Amino acid sequence: MSSAVFHPKMEVLISNSEDRTTRIWDLNKKVEVDCYTNKELDRFWVVAVHPASFTFACGSDSALYVFSLIKERVPFSLVDGKYLCVAERKTVKVVHIHHKAETIIKQLEST
Protein backbone atom coordinates (compact mmCIF):
# COMPACT_ATOMS: atom_id res chain seq x y z
CA MET A 1 0.00 0.00 0.00
CA SER A 2 1.41 3.39 -0.92
CA SER A 3 0.25 6.90 -0.19
CA ALA A 4 0.67 10.31 -1.77
CA VAL A 5 -0.05 13.91 -0.80
CA PHE A 6 0.00 17.23 -2.63
CA HIS A 7 2.09 19.96 -1.06
CA PRO A 8 0.01 23.12 -0.42
CA LYS A 9 2.83 25.61 -1.17
CA MET A 10 4.49 23.96 -4.19
CA GLU A 11 3.38 22.18 -7.34
CA VAL A 12 4.65 18.78 -6.17
CA LEU A 13 3.25 15.41 -5.21
CA ILE A 14 5.03 13.45 -2.47
CA SER A 15 4.57 9.67 -2.55
CA ASN A 16 5.87 6.66 -0.67
CA SER A 17 5.94 3.07 -1.82
CA GLU A 18 6.54 -0.58 -0.96
CA ASP A 19 10.07 -0.23 -2.44
CA ARG A 20 11.13 1.81 0.68
CA THR A 21 11.23 5.10 -1.20
CA THR A 22 9.65 8.50 -0.88
CA ARG A 23 9.55 10.36 -4.19
CA ILE A 24 8.97 13.99 -5.07
CA TRP A 25 7.14 14.57 -8.35
CA ASP A 26 7.01 17.91 -10.21
CA LEU A 27 3.40 18.28 -11.29
CA ASN A 28 4.14 20.84 -14.02
CA LYS A 29 6.95 18.88 -15.68
CA LYS A 30 5.45 15.48 -14.78
CA VAL A 31 8.82 14.09 -13.68
CA GLU A 32 10.43 12.77 -10.53
CA VAL A 33 12.71 15.43 -9.03
CA ASP A 34 14.01 13.66 -5.91
CA CYS A 35 13.96 10.28 -4.20
CA TYR A 36 14.76 9.20 -0.64
CA THR A 37 15.47 5.51 0.00
CA ASN A 38 15.28 3.95 3.43
CA LYS A 39 17.52 0.91 2.82
CA GLU A 40 18.27 0.14 6.46
CA LEU A 41 14.79 0.11 7.89
CA ASP A 42 11.26 -0.79 6.92
CA ARG A 43 9.35 1.03 4.21
CA PHE A 44 7.92 4.50 4.78
CA TRP A 45 4.30 3.92 5.81
CA VAL A 46 3.05 7.48 6.08
CA VAL A 47 3.78 10.85 4.50
CA ALA A 48 2.43 14.21 5.67
CA VAL A 49 3.05 17.81 4.67
CA HIS A 50 3.23 20.93 6.80
CA PRO A 51 0.44 23.31 5.73
CA ALA A 52 2.47 26.53 6.08
CA SER A 53 6.09 25.62 5.31
CA PHE A 54 8.11 23.71 2.73
CA THR A 55 8.57 20.64 4.91
CA PHE A 56 7.15 17.14 4.89
CA ALA A 57 7.55 14.10 7.10
CA CYS A 58 7.76 10.37 6.41
CA GLY A 59 7.38 7.64 8.97
CA SER A 60 8.48 4.02 9.09
CA ASP A 61 8.02 1.41 11.81
CA SER A 62 11.07 2.65 13.69
CA ALA A 63 11.69 6.30 12.72
CA LEU A 64 10.22 9.60 11.63
CA TYR A 65 12.09 11.78 9.13
CA VAL A 66 11.44 15.45 8.37
CA PHE A 67 12.57 16.84 5.01
CA SER A 68 12.57 20.26 3.37
CA LEU A 69 11.62 20.88 -0.25
CA ILE A 70 13.79 24.00 -0.44
CA LYS A 71 17.24 24.89 0.78
CA GLU A 72 17.06 26.48 4.17
CA ARG A 73 19.67 26.92 6.85
CA VAL A 74 21.17 23.64 7.95
CA PRO A 75 19.43 22.31 11.08
CA PHE A 76 21.81 21.76 13.98
CA SER A 77 21.89 21.33 17.73
CA LEU A 78 24.74 21.84 20.21
CA VAL A 79 24.91 19.10 22.87
CA ASP A 80 26.93 19.46 26.10
CA GLY A 81 28.90 22.33 24.56
CA LYS A 82 31.12 19.97 22.59
CA TYR A 83 28.98 17.95 20.15
CA LEU A 84 27.31 19.52 17.13
CA CYS A 85 24.49 17.43 15.64
CA VAL A 86 23.99 18.46 12.02
CA ALA A 87 21.33 17.40 9.52
CA GLU A 88 22.47 18.02 5.97
CA ARG A 89 20.87 16.74 2.82
CA LYS A 90 20.20 13.02 3.38
CA THR A 91 22.79 12.81 6.21
CA VAL A 92 22.65 13.20 9.99
CA LYS A 93 26.05 13.49 11.66
CA VAL A 94 27.69 14.42 14.95
CA VAL A 95 30.80 16.61 15.00
CA HIS A 96 33.03 16.71 18.09
CA ILE A 97 33.92 20.42 18.13
CA HIS A 98 37.27 20.16 19.94
CA HIS A 99 38.60 17.17 18.01
CA LYS A 100 36.87 18.03 14.70
CA ALA A 101 35.90 14.39 14.32
CA GLU A 102 32.71 13.55 12.42
CA THR A 103 30.49 10.52 12.86
CA ILE A 104 27.65 9.80 10.45
CA ILE A 105 24.58 8.71 12.39
CA LYS A 106 22.17 8.09 9.51
CA GLN A 107 22.50 8.17 5.72
CA LEU A 108 19.45 8.12 3.44
CA GLU A 109 20.72 7.07 0.05
CA SER A 110 19.54 8.22 -3.37
CA THR A 111 18.31 5.63 -5.78
Image (cartoon, rainbow, N blue to C red):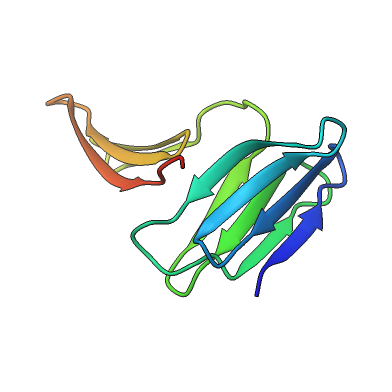
Residue 16 higher or lower than 78, as above or below: below
Image quarter of residue 49? bottom right
User: What x and y, as percent, mark residue 78?
Assistant: 36, 38
Name the residue located 17 percent from the left edge and 24 percent from the top edge.
100
Residue 1 higher or lower than 90, as above or below: below
Q: Residue furthest left?
A: 99
User: What x and y, as percent, mark residue 22?
Assistant: 59, 53
Residue 14 higher or lower than 1, as above or below: above
Name the residue located 87 percent from the left edge and 46 percent from the top edge.
8
Name the residue located 82 percent from the left edge and 47 percent from the top edge.
7
User: What x and y, as percent, mark residue 86?
Assistant: 39, 36
Q: Is residue 93 left or right of residue 61?
A: left
Q: Is residue 54 left or right of residue 84?
A: right
Does residue 54 show up? no
Q: Is residue 8 left or right of residue 97?
A: right
Where's the N terminus, which quadrant? bottom right
Q: Depth check: 76 or 54 in front?
A: 54
Q: Is residue 48 left or right of residue 18?
A: right
Q: Depth check: 8 or 73 in front?
A: 8
User: What x and y, as percent, mark residue 60?
Assistant: 50, 69
